[in-house]
Amino acid sequence: MNFEVAGSKIYYSIHTGIPILGDFNITETLVVSWIVMAIITLLCIFLTRNLQVENISKRQAVAEMIVEAAHNLVRSNTGGTKFDWLIPLVSAIFATSIVSNLICLVGLRSPTADLSTEAAWAIVVFVIITACKIKAGGFLGYLKGFTTPIAVMTPFNILSELATPVSMACRHFGNILSGIVIDGLIYAALAIASSALFGLIPGAVGDVLSQIPILSVGLPAILGVYFDWFTGCMQAFIFSMLTIMYIANAAEG
Amino acid sequence: MGTQDLVTLVPWTFIAQICNLFIQMWLIKKFLFKPIKEVIEKRRQLTENEIKGAREAKEKAESMKKEYETSLSSAQAEAADIVAKAQKEAQGKADNIVKEAEQQAKGLMERAEADIEQSKKKAINEAKDTIGGLAMDIAGKVVEKEINENDHKKLIDEFINNVGEAS
């Protein structure tokens, strides 16, 4: 039996003829991303429907709690209200990441199982980090920062600077992809085990039962709690935290 | 329908995801943060206004209480004053009435005494005259002799006076 994990499907390809960028592919990643965005936006609209000043509904309480939590997360990690402009970005990254990670539970392919997604987020964060550093110390100060503590360190400093977005993107991507791979492996292994076990039953009954992966029921769901739920939530949180931390550090100089 | 590589960076997807992130950011800002912030701000203002109103009401109540207390104490003092004055006046009036009554009684008694005295005198005088005439008649009859009427009168008067003193 063969087992393979494929990349995201390409539904439609628009020929652009631009040299480096290539054709524009409508992939599963993009389609599910749009679904994710729709889910988040509809959830936001649903939560903020019929807002009251007094006597609030449970729905409004949840919405207010989410907003408060976002503010508290950013403010407590940056110390003050200086980074309030970061809140929507961090919230967007967190929400998109967590919904993308968990959408694999309904059978869709997570957009976060495509490196392009995390790379896009990481680049945005990287640009903001760089902008903050330049703003804090000036352009020359930013360049000078690479030569500290001694000039010999410059290549390493540049490397470590570039490693930030790469590590952020790859950490997230790797965790989600590994979840998919492990889930796939377990399913395949259990199917094989199932067919081998029920193949022992003689006659037609054994032939029929061995075709149904009965053992696949149950165990993957339990493992999914860790590989899908826990990892999904954890990675979203880690990515958001790192975004806050890196940007706050950069702005301090 | 093909599939892309498992680990790959597709430029267009990359760009599209950057756009998606910013669109998502804007959507969250517009549909979640803005309305919630507005409602929280409104609530904050409402609470502030209410606290302010309560504080003002409390201050007002306290000033009113002070006012009432001062007015009450002054009213009490006034009442006490009025009562004292009334008592004094009543006492004075009562004293006057008693005095007047005493005077009146005294006057009445004096007049009555005077009347009695006069009546007594009158009665005595009448009795004196009657007794004098009687005595003279009796004496004239007893002695049967002509006496000087003047001497007799003197004698009788003396006798009556002696009788009056003795009685």
Image: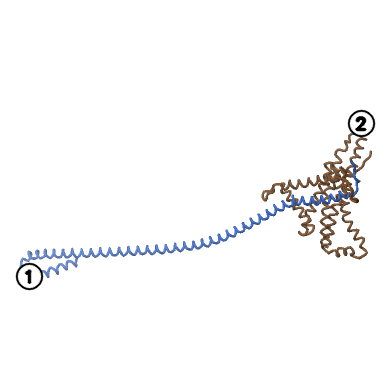
Chain colours: A brown, B blue
Task: Pick the residue in front: A105 or A38.
Answer: A38
Residue occupying image coordinates x 67% and y 51%? A53
Q: Name the residue nearer the viewer: B80 or B51.
A: B51
Judged from this view, the residue extending furthest toward the front is A17
Q: Which numbered dot is residue A239? A: none
The local secondary structure at tag 2 comes to helix
- For the residue pair A251 and B163, the one nearer the viewer reads as A251
Per the image, the residue denoted by label 2 is A207
At label 2, counting other C-alpha atoms closer than 10 Å, the crowd grade (few under 14, some 14-19, many 20 or more) is some
The amino acid type of the residue labelled 2 equals Asp
Instruction: List the residue tagged with mark 1.
Output: B148
Which residue is nearer to you in this view: A34 or A186?
A34
On screen, B150 above or below A163?
A: below
The relative height of residue A23 versus residue A81 in the rendered view (above or below) is above
> The numbered mark 2 sits on a residue in which chain?
A
Q: Position of residue A151 (x, y in %)?
A: 92, 65
Do badges 2 and 1 share one subunit?
no
Q: Residue furthest right?
A: A1
Q: Element at badge 1?
A: loop
Relative horizontal placement of residue B125, taking residue A190 as reference (left or right): left
Quadrant containing the N terminus of chain A in the rendered view: top right
